[in-house]
Image (cartoon, helix red, strand yellow):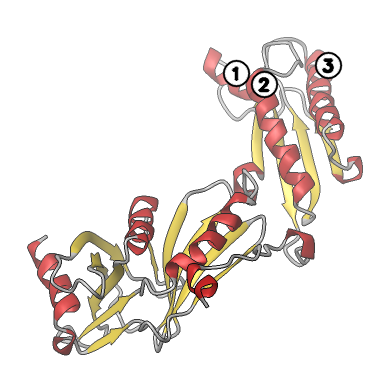
Amino acid sequence: MIKHLVFLIILATSPALMALEYGGAIENTQWQVSGSVFECRFEQTVPGYGTGVFYHRAGEDIQFRLEAVRNLMAYSNAQVGIMPAAWQPSRKSEPLGTAKIVKESPNLSLDSKRSNQFLHALLEGKQPAVSHYTYYDQQRFVGVRLSAASFQDYYPQYLQCVNQLLRVNFDQVKQQRVLFQSNGHNLTPTATKQLEDIAYYIKNDPRVTAVYLDGHTDSIGRRFANREISHARAQKVEQFLINNGVNPDIISTRFHGDRYPIATNKTAAGRAANRRVAIELEQNMDILIPDELIFRPHEIISAKTAAN
């Protein structure tokens, strides 16, 4: 912890001691907000290095990412922290631990807690920073920081983007199991909530081109009766989706009785897991996102613009 603090203080107060430091100045800091109903990107270009991105996916919390054009940092744990505001260089830096640098982009990804701490720091005029020795020489260091310049002008656009995100994302609904009571095919409150989220997502993502429903039972009862029950369960789910706006042409339904258990039928818990309709969504990423689902920020007049 002391090592991290010392390093961040050096980065904040004595850039000359650093072999390489990357970060925008007041006059060239560039923020951009882009996205769709599926995700938002609130990003700053780091001149000469890459991009610092606050990535917010629908249904999830924010994640800070460092995307390098050419990564210079060693592929190990880098130091992460918050430097004081440019006009308060004597203030202490705040070390936030370490995060792993990887070869694939994004080269660094922070957990939601530290990502929110980065965002909060910018609201206070402070500078989030990542620092590490280079992959080619452990005696040479690289520091990357985000500038808070113009942040307040673009932050409202980021909030607009977040507010229009869907409440769930594809990965959260693409494979689901709707469970049923013994010998029954009525939907429980939990199943209803699951299906509401699935229908909601399908209606809002034109890239979902197929929905597969597979009905199953436990092994209690005769095989023919179980096939009928599994059929009724699959039909129940299918009808719910159709009633909630899903195109019936993309739904395929099958029923299997007790032929494909996913757990033992010797226990109550196992039988409960087997009484299910498995739902799988298929998404075609070659389909372009329609223009009406792309984020378009409302006009925001900053204090600086209003003064002019």
**Disc 1 crowd, CA 10 A, few/some/many (<14, 14-19, 20+):** some
Q: Position of residue 64 (x, y in %)?
A: 41, 62
Label 1 element class: helix
Q: Position of residue 13 (x, y in %)?
A: 15, 78
Quarter of the image that includes the N terminus: bottom left
Circle 3: residue type: Phe
Circle 2: residue type: Arg
Disc assigned to residue 224: 3
Q: Is residue 208 above or below residue 74?
A: above
Q: Residue at x 86, y 46 (%)?
A: 250
Q: Which one is closest to the eye, mark 1 or mark 3?
A: 1
Looking at marks 2 and 3 on the same chain, the residue that comes earlier in the sequence is marked by 3
Give how far apart the Cα atoms at labels 2 and 3 are.
15 Å
Residue 102: quarter of image:
bottom left
Give how far apart the Cα atoms at labels 1 and 3 are.
19 Å
Residue 145: quarter of image:
bottom left
Q: Is residue 61 left or right of residue 171?
A: left
Residue highlighted by disc 1 = 272
The reply to whether dot 2 and dot 1 touch (C-beta < 8 Å) is yes
Q: Residue at x 75, y 38 (%)?
A: 199
Looking at marks 1 and 3 on the same chain, the residue that comes earlier in the sequence is marked by 3
Label 3 element class: helix
**Disc 2 crowd, CA 10 A, few/some/many (<14, 14-19, 20+):** many
